[in-house]
């Protein structure tokens, strides 16, 4: 038992868990003031529910012995994690450390989707969606991508038969969440006033804080995926840092050339785009290759977020533009910039590897995208027809926080003797009118 590796895995799991509250801050600052608590609750609700489901059967579906064709692990093999608390003296780290590390990946993946449907989603339906989606989409896809064949154990088809590279979740996490987000917004529909009324972030410092916590936690996400405190973790750490920096700079450059101003929201978004893109590739490319991937992703994602206005879908917080596009960029470019001198040991097209790895990356990305989109569309359509996915018009106009949670993110009644609830509402309306003007 290697205590250093065990400590690194558990520390990385804690870092990745911190990413979900960081995401709640990031998303919470990007929505309007009347929606901030609901937006954050969608992340915290996912954190609570997925933790329970992962223990009951999620780990078994993702990492149990394959039941056929590399599509699904045996859901009964590790049900309730029975028999997994006994220490194996021959193992490098406790299996429960790996269970914890992979659990937080499942949590952040479903939380990412929530940003696409901000400002209009029933919390109760969201929680039912989380339970169904992780069960029939995320857990099986995690098996495809992360479950490798071992001694007497058969894993997933992308990891083993296809041999596509995805070190930390470009397909299983980001393409998966991004495709699901696109399906969800097509089913639920646009926010009232989308394209006509200003829907600007209400708290940009909150957005920047969330982006900083995501960047910090992402070192556990990527470097932690080495599952050891060694060279692979160090390479992933450096690539994560420099690729993210390059992506932020590229996003800001696009803004400067296109709009005349580099923005704080652009910086935060560029950071996330870079983190997304380097996630699958952080053990497969050199630092220079990582920076190229980051720069390409930062520029393309900056352009992609505007597609929702041209194509007419309302992806509230640009989950499609950042996570789907960034995940595809990072996954596919392994086939271009991959180098055998990296821990992954595979050459891409630019290093004499031909198109062998490139086609594998494309197939893996497309397979996850199509599966996630189609299944999510069906799930969302059924929930829309049965429970209803949207709050009613009065709740959406008046404030989803009050309608769904009977709370307000900002109690203006505590500021001065004349600032009661009525005057707070009046002030907010005046501000909205000034912004519209």
Image (cartoon, rainbow, N blue to C red):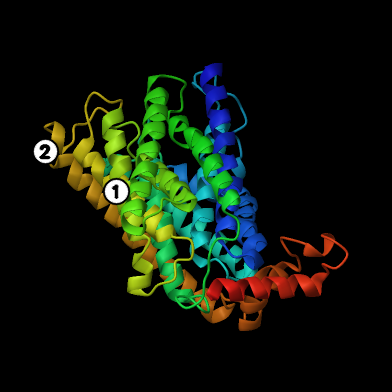
**Side of 374 where 11 appears, left or right:** right
Q: Which residue is drawn at 40% across and 58% down?
A: 178
User: x, y percentage for residue 413?
Assistant: 82, 65
Look at the picture and state if 5 lies above or below 283: above
Residue ID for mark 2: 354
Q: Which residue is drawn at 31% across and 29% down?
A: 287
Question: Residue 303's quadrant in the figure?
Answer: bottom left
Residue ID for mark 1: 329
Task: Name the mark nearer the viewer: 2 or 1.
Answer: 1
**Residue 28 visible in the current orientation:** yes
Callout 2: helix, strand or loop? loop
Q: Residue at x 54, y 54 (%)?
A: 111
**Side of 62 where 213 appears, left or right:** right
Of residues 67 and 387, the one nearer the viewer is 387
**Residue 399 visible in the current orientation:** no
Whole-angstrom CA distance, mark 2 to mark 1, is: 18 Å
User: x, y percentage for residue 358?
Assistant: 19, 44
């Amino acid at each position: 038992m290697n205590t250093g590796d065990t400590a690194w895995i558990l520390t990385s799991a804690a870092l990745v868990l911190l990413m979900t509250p960081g995401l709640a801050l990031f998303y919470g600052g990007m929505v309007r003031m009347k929606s901030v608590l609901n937006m954050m609750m969608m992340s915290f609700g996912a954190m609570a529910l997925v933790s329970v489901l992962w223990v009951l059967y999620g780990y078994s579906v993702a990492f149990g012995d394959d039941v056929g064709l590399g599509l699904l692990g045996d859901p009964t093999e590790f049900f309730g994690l029975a028999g997994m608390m006994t220490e194996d003296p021959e193992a490098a780290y406790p299996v429960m450390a790996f269970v914890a590390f992979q659990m937080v990946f499942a949590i952040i993946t479903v939380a990412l989707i929530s940003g696409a449907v901000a400002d209009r989603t029933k919390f109760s339906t969201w929680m039912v969606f989380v339970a169904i989606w992780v069960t029939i989409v995320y857990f099986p896809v995690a098996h495809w991508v992360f479950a490798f064949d071992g001694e007497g154990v058969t894993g997933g088809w992308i990891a083993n038969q296809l041999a596509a590279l995805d070190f930390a979740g470009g397909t299983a996490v980001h393409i998966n969440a991004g495709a699901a987000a696109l399906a969800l917004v097509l089913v639920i529909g646009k926010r009232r006033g989308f394209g006509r009324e200003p829907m600007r972030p209400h708290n940009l410092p909150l957005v920047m804080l969330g982006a900083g916590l995501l960047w910090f936690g992402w070192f556990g996400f990527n470097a932690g995926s080495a599952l050891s405190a060694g060279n692979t973790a160090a390479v992933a750490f450096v690539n994560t840092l420099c690729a993210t920096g390059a992506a932020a700079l590229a996003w800001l450059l696009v803004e400067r050339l296109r709009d005349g101003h580099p923005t704080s929201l652009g910086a935060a978004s560029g950071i996330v785009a870079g983190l997304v893109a380097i996630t699958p590739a952080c053990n497969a490319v050199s630092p220079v290759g990582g920076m190229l991937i980051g720069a390409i992703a930062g520029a393309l994602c900056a352009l992609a977020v505007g597609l929702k206005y041209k194509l007419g879908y309302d992806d509230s917080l640009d989950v499609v533009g950042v996570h789907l596009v960034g995940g595809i960029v990072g996954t596919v470019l392994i086939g271009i910039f991959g180098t055998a001198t990296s821990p992954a040991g595979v050459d891409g097209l630019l290093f004499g590897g031909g198109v062998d790895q490139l086609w594998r990356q494309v197939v893996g990305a497309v397979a996850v995208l199509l599966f996630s989109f189609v299944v999510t569309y069906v799930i969302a359509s059924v929930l829309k027809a049965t429970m209803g996915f949207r709050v009613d018009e009065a709740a959406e106009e008046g404030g989803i926080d009050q309608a769904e949670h009977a709370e307000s993110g900002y109690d203006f009644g505590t500021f001065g003797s004349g600032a009661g609830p009525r005057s707070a509402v009046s002030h907010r309306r005046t501000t909205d009118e000034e912004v519209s003007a």
